[in-house]
Each structure stands twice: as C-alpha cells, then as structure tokens.
Image (spheres, grey):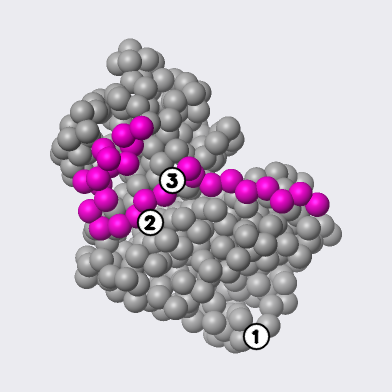
Amino acid sequence: MTYALKAPARYVQGAGELDRLGRNLKKLGNRFLLIGSDNSWNRFGEHVCRSLEAEEKQVVFGGFCGEATKEEVFSKMDLCKAQSCDGVIGMGGGKALDTAKAVAENLGLPCIIVPTVASNDAPCSGVAVLYNEQGVVVKAVLMRRNPDLVVVDTEIIAKAPVRLFAAGLGDALATWFEARACHKSGARTMARGNVSNTALMMSRLCYDLLMEHGVEALEAVRQHTVTKALEDVVEASIYLSGLGFENGGLAAAHAINDGLAQEPQTHGMYHGEKVAFGVLAQLVLEDAPRDELARVLAFMKQVGLPTTFAELGIQTVNEENLRKAAEAACVPTQSTRNLRESITPEEVYQAMQKADALGRSGL
Ligand SMILES: [Zn+2]
C-alpha cells in the first residue's frame, strides 16, 4: 500500500481576493502572461493590472481562442517566450485554465490559476485536458506539480451564472462517493497511490459541506451575495472536490459522464451536471442504502441538477446510444472498474435506467 497526496502549493479564497493577486504572486515571477478570454479581461483586467502594478509586477494579456487545443498551447508558449514572461496566469472557466496549465508545464514556469466560476473540480488539479477543434478530448497532460497558486475571488463567483454554480455542486457531489468506492476496492488514484485517510476525510468533508450549505449557497449566488455558506461551499466545490478526485480517485460517476459523450443529446450539458447523474447511477450500482439515495436525490432536485434522461437533454431515449455510453464507461481505461473489476456494460446501462426512473418517480 502507498499513500500519495498532491495539491496546489497555495490556495487563497475570499471576497475581493483578485485585488490582492499581486501580493499573492509576488514571489512567483515579475512578468506574467495572462491567458483568458476578452470577456474575462474586460471584466477583471483592471483589477489584475492594478494589483500587480502595486507590487511592481507586469502582466501581458495573451487572450484565448476558446478551445484548449495543442495549437493554442503552442501559440501561447511562443507568445510567452516573445514577451519574456516568467509566469503564467490562467483566468476563466475550464478551458483557459487548461491551456495556462499546459503552457506553464511545457515551459517549466510557475502556474497561477484564477477561476471565475465554480463549475467544476479542475482549478486545483495537476491535470490539463486538451481538445481538438471539434471539442473532443485528445489528451490529458499530467503536470509535474499542481498549480503554484489558486486564487478564488468569491465576489466574482457569486456573480457567475446560477446553472454553472449548480454544475460545480454536481461535480463535487461525486467526490465522496468515488473516493469511498476507490478506498473500498483498493484502487489507485491520480496521485499514484491508494486512498489515504486524509483524502477520504477531505472527500467526506466536501460532501458534508454540500449537504449542509449547498442550497443556501446557491441562493446566495442567485442574490449575487457572498455569505458564509457560499464560502464554505466554494471551498468544497473548488478545493476539496479537486483534491478529492486526484487523491481519492474516480469511479463510475465520472466514467458515466465520459460515456455520455456517446449520446449527442447530452452535449449541451455541463460536466458537473452529467457527473451528478452519474452519481445516481453509481449509487444504484453500489446498491446504496435507501436513505443515502433519498438524500442525494433530494439534494439534486433542490439545486436543479438533472435526475432524469429528459433533464439531461435526452428528449428521445435512444437505447443504442445509451448502451454505447455504458460500453464506453466500462472500457479498461475507465474508472468504473474502480467500483468493481467485474462490472459489465449491461449493469451500467440498467443502473442508468434505474437512476432515470428514480428521478421521475422517486424512491
Ligand atoms: Zn469532475
């Protein structure tokens, strides 16, 4: 047995933290390339510039094409060198952050991540996912180390779209159940070890914070206000969810999300929304206790996460596509095996059907 843990070197979260970005990255370089969309630059660029200037640091706005492709990574690497930058800042949702991570990794430079939404578990991780022009995943770059600094300004998160925040709750909902499954089966995690007590505890804390404050936090986002509940849940959905999946492992919930790429009707859904449906299916596969299933189902309904095929965007249930999704979730490289080695596509298909039935008519 091996215990292995990985995490960002520093994580800072609070209202107005973007205005203190300069102070936080003071020791990480002098001239930073910022990778982010025009939209995020227009909204937050002034804060970034002001806070870096106060520390006599410089920032070069590098833009972002909208897709984390290899070409985009190479082009930003060239820009970084041409501009003599010695650090990379990624700012935005998912793909700008992936691009920044890959650029920093390839050039061996410090990596600073500033998520502007709390929609997924990626900001703190040491993984950068790259896509082709069509948006299909082509590669996951495993970084030598996780980001040097992650700065989360909860005033910004509180103003982001409610549906994105809810998707983040869905992604975080999977953390505990997947870590628990990996712990039980003895699976290895992305930190290249077994599930440590620390990882298990962090994953459980993630779940408890969601259950206790998730609904209240979502309400705070609706009101665009930063509350204690929001702070606690952002800690869960950005920090604990990220550390949880890398150190606690993935199981059926994330594999089913990946498998759903086989059903085009779900393509408009966010990662965390599909993962949440995957959680329901995983609980069915595990034959989870009735009260646990009821609690998860009630939470998902309260925060507006999809519990049925229809809510996942599947208007016409297509058996062939769903069977393909189940098949894809069970290939040897997928994490469904972390639940149980012998799991079959038929079981996963039946579990998805049962999850949909639970979502439609309850327990
Ligand atoms: Zn995820």
- Give the alpha-carbon distance from disc 1 to disc 3, as whole Å: 39 Å
Question: How many numbered circles are shown?
Answer: 3
Task: Determine whether label 1 and label 3 are within 8 Å by CB.
Answer: no
- Give the alpha-carbon distance from disc 3 to disc 2, as whole Å: 18 Å
Is residue 199 positioned above or below 91 on the image?
below
Q: Earlier in the sequence, mark 1 or mark 2?
A: 2
Is residue 25 positioned above or below 16 on the image?
above
What amino acid type is highlighted by mark number 1?
A: Arg
What amino acid type is highlighted by mark number 2?
A: Ala
Q: Can you tell which quarter of the image residue 161 is in? A: bottom left
Q: Is label 1 or label 3 in front?
A: 3
Q: Residue at x 48, y 43 (%)?
A: 9
What amino acid type is highlighted by mark number 3?
A: Arg
**Where does label 3 land, which residue?**
10
Q: Position of residue 347 (x, y in %)?
A: 75, 66
Q: Is residue 52 left or right of residue 237?
A: left
The segment highlighted magenta reads: 1-27
Q: Is label 3 or label 2 in front?
A: 3
Element assignment for label 2: loop
**Where does label 2 land, which residue?**
118
Element assignment for label 3: loop
Q: Residue at x 76, y 65 (%)?
A: 184
Q: Is residue 228 left or right of residue 123?
A: left
Q: For this rendering, which residue is in front, 15 or 75? A: 15
Q: Position of residue 250 (x, y in %)?
A: 64, 55
Find the residue positioned furthest to the right.
342
Q: Is residue 17 magenta?
A: yes
Q: Can you tell which quarter of the image residue 65 is in? A: top left
**Where does label 1 land, which residue?**
290
Examine the rendering and report whether any part of residue 274 can be seen.
no
Element assignment for label 1: helix
Q: Residue at x 41, y 49 (%)?
A: 11
